[in-house]
Amino acid sequence: MKKLTILGATGSIGVSSLDVVARHANEFDVQYLSTYQNVALLFEQAQKFRPRAVAIYKEDSVHEYAQRFKEIGVEIVTGFDGVLELSRRDDVDIFVNALVGAVGLQPTLNAIKPGRRIALANKETLVLGGELVMRQARQVGAEVIPIDSEHSALLQCIVGEEAAAVQKIVLTASGGPFRERPETEFGRISVAEALNHPNWTMGPKITIDSATLMNKGLEVIEAFWLFGLAPEEIDVVVHPQSIVHSFVEFRDGSIKAQLGLPDMRVPIQYALSFPKRLAADFPRLDFSQLRDLTFEQPDYEKFRCLKLAFDALAEGGSAPAVLNASNEEAVHLFLKEMIRFDQISQIVEEALTQCPRNGRCDAATLLAADQTTREYVQSTFS
Ligand code: MG
């Protein structure tokens, strides 16, 4: 039995992770769960999976549940300190980080321990602290296994190959809901339109990131750290059907791809069972029903965020932290209808020129860059 922590248990990835766990009750045992503030769902999950403890980020949402958790023998810790405390506990084999945003970095760093597997859905962990996280993981002998569908696809293609045989990786992008919308109309895009992703059902932050293609930019940086390639060996292709989850090109010109229906339970299960595959009856891809699979170049002018992410990766140091923090704040302002959709990329671009950056990559420097950038965006645009 592998013992699990799932941070962000009540979000889209957390719920899918528990679905996978429930299908393999003899393989996985839940030890710790956390939520931001959805205590009602967390309690249901606790009743079913009986973790040792849960963390509730927003302390004021605990209320009447305190007693109910106690009755079923589940310890509660609260606040971000509570999340950090759970991330430091030792009796865990697999640490699933499904938090949203840069807040995921510190728990990941805490959880890196010898023999531990970090199953990572929180891509900001690597965007912000890729160098730090990968170095610490190597030093202590921890594994970092991606949950993100593209990176899972890449891992599935690369497994069993020599690292030097990989020439290039190509991340597929759905292109989001505005692939065919002229840029001149971007100022009028509503929150509801931007939250309506054509292929995937996800939380609000990542759905907006998919609409601006920042999500793909963050994934490029994530792939850089996971697979150790040069930035110019990482490419993006728009594939609106989201069936091919990514490609790997080898030095002999051969290309491998991983395909499947857009269902996050597949990459989640693979991250938990890797390198084994467990049986599952998830819906299958039916080639007789398959329409065209199409591929096109992304429009880097129209979707500036993708270009800015490549630029931040090339610059290195704390530039990706500035990119990420300014984007998180801009998306937050857009969701509150305080800025227009087209201002998200403008804010990120401005932050990348205005906010101080340097080449160091220790946790204190990165978190300071993150904080300074947030303050800059908040004071300038809200
Ligand atoms: Mg993805």
Image (cartoon, helix red, strand yellow):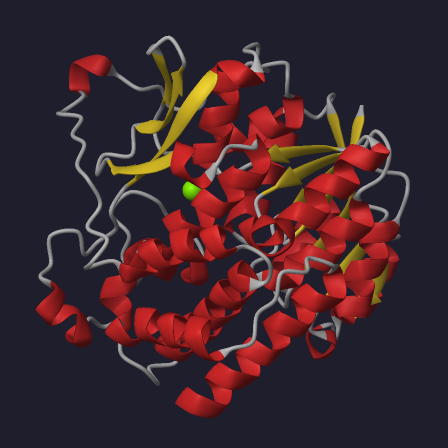
Q: Identify which residue is drawn at 57% across, 27% down.
A: 269
Q: How many marks?
A: 0
Q: Identify which residue is drawn at 40% across, 26% down.
A: 168
Q: Identify which residue is drawn at 25% across, 58% down.
A: 303
Up-down: is 382 above or below 169?
below
Up-down: is 14 above or below 253?
below
Ligand 1 located in image quadrant: top left
Q: Position of residue 246 (x, y in %)?
A: 37, 28
Give the left or right position of residue 266, taking residue 108 as reference: left
Q: Position of residue 41 (x, y in %)?
A: 61, 57
Position of the C terminus, as image quadrant, is bottom left
Give the left or right position of residue 198, taking residue 76 as reference: left
Position of the N terminus, as image quadrant, is top right
Is residue 382 among the parts visible in the rendering?
Answer: no
Where residue 209 sits, quadrant-wise, is: bottom left
For the residue pair 314 and 370, the one nearer the viewer reads as 314
Where residue 243 sits, quadrant-wise, is: top left
Q: Position of residue 65 (x, y in %)?
A: 75, 67
Give the left or right position of residue 288, taking residue 93 as reference: left
For the residue pair 195 and 29, the one nearer the viewer reads as 195
Where residue 348 sits, quadrant-wise, is: bottom left
Is residue 370 among the parts visible in the rendering?
Answer: yes
Q: Identify which residue is drawn at 50% across, 63% down.
A: 324
Q: Position of residue 244 (x, y in %)?
A: 31, 26
Up-down: is 214 above or below 226?
below
